[in-house]
Image (cartoon, rainbow, N blue to C red):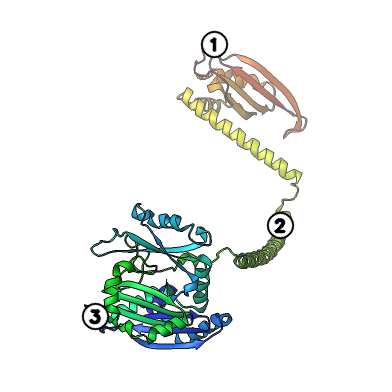
């Protein structure tokens, strides 16, 4: 996003900055759809070599150089122009081949050099078919220092050019259709003479200061057009002959070679060290701070949980005590012995009634007459002075037992005889007869009451359905 903002605020035109030993010179050139570009602003500021960085930073702040695309020039002592024969290799291998050809022509190792190439074409020669080619070589250290100088000042440097090409570009703006153009420029290191025709640089010579002054006084230079035409073939073999000018900024890798020189190498830009010592220290500090914050939060959370646990334990103990208290209060007291006896009696009575109910149900099912005939027989046969206290009929009438009391023992046989006359009791054998005398007195004095029990079982012709005894 910051890169987009910086691009959006860039203004049109080109900013050229020359770093000379005793000064920094700059010019802002605009095209503005005019016939020729024009310099909108230019200036020269004195600056010692040791103050170039601070001076450029000050100029950048004052004139806002960050708004423009910038180009700069190297000093003649900082580079070499070398004539080489074009190697017969594919276009993508051309630069590597040129570097191999000039490795013995420079004073430093080829791996420490920044190299750009351009071809020199003769009349009628097409692009890529030139018979000569030039290489511009400069030490990497020079390029790195120049890029660092502009990068520290915040100036967006895009092109690193050489004076020969820059002067040819300016001269091409003033050419006539049928005449060559000579341009002589002076600087702190001397003079530079260039002669161009139809945008093609025919001749370039560097002159010492005294030579430059003498050359400027000669009038023959003004008549150099004829000299250029006569010497054009010879000039092709002179060091410093350059190809025709081409509009636009220099771009690496465009076609077989570039007709503009650009020694700018983005690899020499200051790379952001994402894992530098400072960055790692900051990251470590943030990590320690994060761990400390996490530990503090965990410690606080642990204390909170400990308080909640303690409160839960206290609530649990209270509820446990309340439960014990309620349990103790609701525990039944030791039951009384009389209550146990009453319970047993009740259970026995219930069992007896259930047995009686079962006997009644069984008797009714075994004998459709039931026990009514037996009871009618006992009701019809009565003996004065004798009474029955209990009658037990079991196994559907197969077993009969009766108990009672009498005033005299002789009354018992009388009752038995009468009962045998009843159809329901006829033919039943007498199994047992027990007569005891009771100690209780009767109504009259001296008379004793006897208790008797008579047991009788039905003979072998009893009904088969009365299989087992029932109470």
Q: Looking at the image, is 247 positioned above or below residue 320?
A: below
Residue 1 seen in the current view: no
- Look at mark 1 in the image and give the residue it sits on: 460
Q: Is residue 149 left or right of residue 38?
A: right
- Which label lies toward us, 1 or 3? 3
Q: Report the residue at 29% width, 82% height from top.
A: 223
Q: Residue at x 46, y 83 (%)?
A: 210
Residue at 30% from the left image edge and 82% from the top image edge: 31
Image position, residue 446 (x, y; %): 78, 30
Where's residue 370, x and y in %? 49, 26
Displayed quadrant of residue 289: bottom right
Spatial separation of the CA atoms under disc 1 and disc 3: 166 Å
Label 2 residue SS: helix
Q: Nearer the viewer, mark 1 or mark 2?
A: 2
Q: Give residue 320's mark.
A: 2
Indicate which disc, 1 or 2, sits on the residue closer to the N terminus: 2
């Amino acid at each position: 996003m910051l890169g987009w903002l910086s691009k959006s605020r860039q203004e049109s035109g080109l900013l050229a900055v020359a770093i000379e030993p005793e000064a920094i010179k700059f010019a802002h050139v605009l095209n503005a759809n005019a016939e020729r570009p024009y310099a909108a602003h230019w200036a020269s500021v004195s600056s010692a070599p040791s103050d170039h960085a601070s001076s450029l930073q000050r100029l950048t702040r004052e004139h806002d150089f960050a708004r423009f695309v910038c180009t700069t020039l190297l000093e003649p002592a900082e580079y070499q122009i070398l004539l080489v024969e074009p190697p017969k290799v594919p276009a993508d291998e051309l630069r590597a081949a040129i570097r191999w050809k000039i490795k013995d022509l420079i004073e430093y190792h080829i791996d420490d050099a920044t190299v750009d190439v351009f071809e020199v074409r003769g009349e009628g020669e097409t692009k890529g078919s030139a018979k000569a080619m030039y290489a511009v070589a400069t030490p990497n250290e020079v390029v790195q220092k120049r890029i660092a100088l502009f990068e520290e000042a915040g100036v967006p440097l895009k092109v690193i050019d050489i004076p020969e090409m820059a002067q040819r570009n300016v001269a091409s703006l003033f050419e006539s259709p049928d005449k060559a153009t000579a341009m002589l420029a002076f600087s702190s290191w001397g003079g530079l003479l260039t002669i161009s025709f139809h945008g093609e640089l025919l001749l370039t010579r560097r002159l010492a200061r005294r030579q430059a002054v003498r050359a400027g006084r000669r009038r023959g230079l003004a008549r150099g057009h004829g000299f250029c035409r006569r010497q054009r073939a010879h000039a092709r073999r002179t060091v410093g002959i350059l190809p025709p000018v081409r509009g636009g900024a220099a771009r690496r890798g465009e076609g077989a070679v570039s007709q503009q020189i650009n020694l700018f190498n983005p690899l020499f830009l200051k790379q952001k060290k994402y894992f530098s010592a400072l960055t790692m220290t900051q990251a470590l500090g943030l990590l320690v701070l994060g761990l400390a914050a996490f530990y503090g939060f965990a410690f606080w959370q642990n204390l909170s949980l400990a308080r909640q646990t303690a409160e839960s334990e206290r609530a649990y103990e209270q509820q446990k005590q309340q439960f014990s208290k309620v349990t103790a209060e609701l525990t039944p007291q030791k039951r009384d012995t009389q209550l146990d006896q009453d319970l047993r009696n009740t259970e026995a009575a219930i069992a007896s009634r259930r047995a009686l109910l079962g006997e009644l149900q069984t008797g009714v099912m075994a004998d459709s007459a039931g026990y009514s005939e037996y009871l009618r027989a006992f009701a019809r046969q009565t003996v004065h002075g004798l009474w029955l206290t209990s009658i037990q009929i079991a196994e559907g009438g197969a077993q009969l037992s009766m108990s009672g009391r009498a005033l005299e023992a002789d009354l018992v046989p009388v009752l038995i005889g009468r009962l045998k006359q009843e159809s329901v009791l006829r033919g039943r054998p007498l199994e047992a007869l027990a007569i005891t005398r009771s100690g209780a007195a009767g109504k009259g004095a001296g008379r004793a009451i006897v208790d008797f029990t008579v047991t009788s079982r039905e003979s072998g012709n009893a009904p088969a359905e009365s299989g087992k005894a029932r109470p």
